[in-house]
Amino acid sequence: MFNRRKYLQGTALVGATAALAACGLDGGGGSGSSEGGGEGGPVPFTIYTARDSELAEKVVADFEAANPEWEGMATVLTLGAQEALERVRAEKSNPQGDLWWGGTRQQLSQGAADGILAPAPQEVIDAVPEEYRDPEGLWVGEMLLAELFMINTEMISGDEVPADWDDLLGSEYAGNIVIRDVEASGTMRAIYCAMIDRLYDDEGSAEAGYEWLRGLDANTATYAANPTDMYQRVSRQEAALSLWNLQDIMLQKNGDFPMFDAVVPSSGAPMLVDGLAKIAGGPGGAGADAFISYLMSVEVQTAMAEEHFQIPAIELEEEPQWLAELGLEEMELDWDRIAENEDEWIGHWASSIKGKG
């Protein structure tokens, strides 16, 4: 049983406030920054996270166990990745959070461009390959996130399971797909943009991708408000499948929803860089530094890979067995084009495609 005193979901937030003067970190982790510290010891810090809530709570509990001086200091607020970006933007003049944990490369890059992020500890920046981080370390990739099909094995199996992305448009899946609310979800925004980008060169525009999304909308039974709503709808057999990320599918399969399974599309899976960033000017920056350094250590990332189905951005000595057995193939995409057009593409989907099928 976790002794967590401050864990929140939704939009209610207990703000982390600093009441002590500045001091550096000790060996418990972090970069030695004095931001958010005090002579009397560590002060509270706030994490905005799009990560699975049970996983996030477990990691925070382990962090506190390894760093007793930070016990009870972390407030965790669960948000969609896009919601986290919008919240940090809105709080720019008076930051309330200290760490944004869980966002796509595109979203984190937007945050860096907006001036709302601060560099991670230098030892973390040095450990992450250049292709998986901001050049100045304003965000760092934590993991590579494969986007796949999530199915209810009690409803479909064998030849009934879609083999590839285009199969989702078949009439046999009409009303059998539940989709997480796209606009608020970094995962879903990335999947939908990937579906547009993979067809972009056919006509030199987004039109072929838009047409594909119209077909998917026609087969979509409903748009779930959040991941929990999506899991419950699929488990209750309101629909047979969804689109989601590999890690969360595997966590649910090995948790509350053993009927779930992950299906790798035959033409490949979009592979996102999912990362984290320190929030500029946050009141508990020292806690953010300490947590980032702990989370991104080789020891913790190895455990995350073996126990939580994570594909780390940092190099590990050995690939976990479950990943080697999956046979994962990456879909080739132009992520720079996606980053440049994401807002326009998702805005067009929301205004002209969603619910029209």
Image (cartoon, helix red, strand yellow):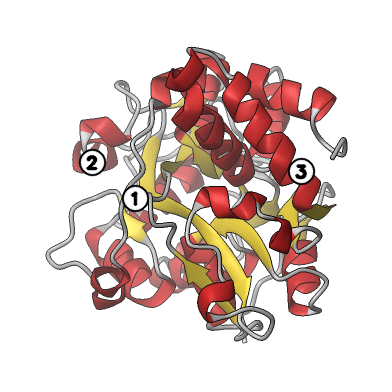
Q: Which quarter of the image is occupied by the N terminus?
A: bottom right
Q: For the residues marked 3 and 1, what is the alpha-carbon distance in whole angstroms? A: 42 Å
Q: Nearer the viewer, residue 154 or 29?
A: 154
Q: Residue at x 60, y 86 (%)?
A: 258
Mark nearer the viewer, 3 or 1: 3
Q: Is residue 223 above or below residue 24?
A: below
For disc 3, the marked residue is 217
Q: Quadrant of residue 283?
A: top right
**Callout 3: 10 Å neighbours few (<14), some, many (20+)?**
many
Q: Is residue 201 above or below residue 3?
A: above
Amino acid, disc 2: Glu
**Rendering coords of residue 72 (x, y %):** 61, 65
Q: Nearer the viewer, residue 246 or 354?
A: 354
Amino acid, disc 1: Ser
Asked if the residue at tag 2 contacts the one at tag 1, i.e. Cβ–Cβ closer than 8 Å, the answer is yes
Q: Which quarter of the image is occupied by the C terminus?
A: top right
For disc 1, the marked residue is 293
Sequence-wise, which precedes: disc 1 or disc 2?
2
Q: Is 319 on the left-hand or right-hand side of 335?
A: left
**Rendering coords of residue 241 (x, y %):** 66, 66
Mark nearer the viewer, 3 or 2: 3
Amino acid, disc 3: Asp
**Callout 1: 10 Å neighbours few (<14), some, many (20+)?**
many
For disc 2, the marked residue is 123
Q: For the residues marked 3 and 2, what is the alpha-carbon distance in whole angstroms? A: 45 Å
Q: Nearer the viewer, residue 188 or 26?
A: 188
Q: Is residue 163 above or below residue 220?
A: below
